[in-house]
C-alpha cells in the first residue's frame, strides 16, 4: 500500500492499448536473473507478496532480490447488497497494471539453477505467463 497518494480513487482506464508492450524496465539491470511478464494484466499486491515470499523462502539467506513493480493503482469495491448510486465504493486493494515485456523480479548472488527454480515458482503464483531471463540473454 502506498504511503501517500495524490488521488485516493482512480479511474479504471479504458484499455486503449490492448496490444501494447512495455517500454520501461524490459532488461535485467540490477541482478543476474529476472522474471519477465509475457501477458498484460493487473497484478494485485497480494499476488506480488505471495511470489516475493516464495522467492525469499527459496533463497535461504543467500542472494539479493529486487522487486521492479509497485502496486499503486487503487481498486474500489462496493459491498454486496448495496444499491446503485451513492457514489464510488471504498478502496479495496492496490494493483500494478503490467504489460508484456516488463521485468517483475530480479535475483543475484545465487546459482542459475536455484534462481531459475525460485523465479519460475514465483511465476506460478502470478496470474500471467512469465519467462526466466538472464542478464546477457535479453
Image: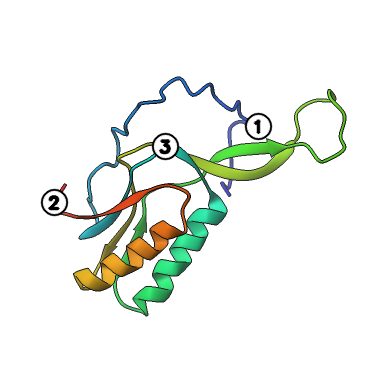
Residue drawn at x 84%, y 25% as measured from the top left: 84
Residue denoted by label 2: 137
Residue drawn at x 17%, y 54% as measured from the top left: 135
Residue drawn at x 31%, y 77% as measured from the top left: 62
Residue drawn at x 47%, y 59% as measured from the top left: 125
Residue denoted by label 1: 9
Find the distance from the CA under tag 2 to the CA under tag 1.
40 Å
Is 51 above or below relative to 85? below
Instruction: Indicate the quadrant where residue 119 lies.
Output: bottom left
Name the spot of residue 94 as percent of width and height, x first: 58, 44
Is 13 above or below relative to 102? above
Q: Which secondary structure, mark 3?
A: loop
Instruction: Indicate the quadrant where residue 33 lies.
Output: bottom left
Q: Earlier in the sequence, mark 2 or mark 1?
A: 1
Q: Which secondary structure, mark 2?
A: loop
Residue denoted by label 3: 40
In this view, the residue farthest toward the left is 136
Find the distance from the CA under tag 1 to the CA under tag 3.
22 Å
Kindly report which numbered mark, 1 or 3, lies closer to the viewer in this rendering.
3
From the viewer's perspective, tell me whether residue 39 is left or right of residue 50: left
* Residue 61 is at least partly visible in this image: yes
Is 41 above or below relative to 58? above
| Circles 2, 3 touching at the beta carbon (< 8 Å) | no
Find the distance from the CA under tag 2 to the CA under tag 3.
22 Å
Amino acid at each position: 500500500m502506498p504511503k501517500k497518494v495524490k488521488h485516493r480513487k482512480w479511474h479504471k482506464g479504458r484499455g486503449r492499448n490492448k496490444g501494447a508492450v512495455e517500454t520501461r524496465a524490459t532488461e535485467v539491470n540490477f541482478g543476474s536473473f529476472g522474471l519477465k511478464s509475457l501477458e498484460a494484466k493487473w497484478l494485485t499486491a497480494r499476488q506480488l507478496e505471495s511470489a516475493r515470499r516464495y522467492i525469499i523462502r527459496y533463497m535461504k539467506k543467500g542472494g539479493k532480490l529486487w522487486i521492479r513493480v509497485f502496486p499503486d493503482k487503487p481498486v474500489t469495491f462496493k459491498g454486496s447488497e448495496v444499491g446503485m448510486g451513492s457514489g464510488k465504493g471504498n478502496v479495496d486493494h492496490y494493483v500494478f497494471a503490467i504489460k508484456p515485456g516488463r521485468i517483475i523480479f530480479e535475483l543475484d548472488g545465487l546459482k542459475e539453477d536455484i534462481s531459475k527454480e525460485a523465479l519460475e515458482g514465483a511465476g506460478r503464483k502470478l496470474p500471467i505467463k512469465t519467462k526466466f531471463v538472464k542478464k546477457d540473454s535479453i
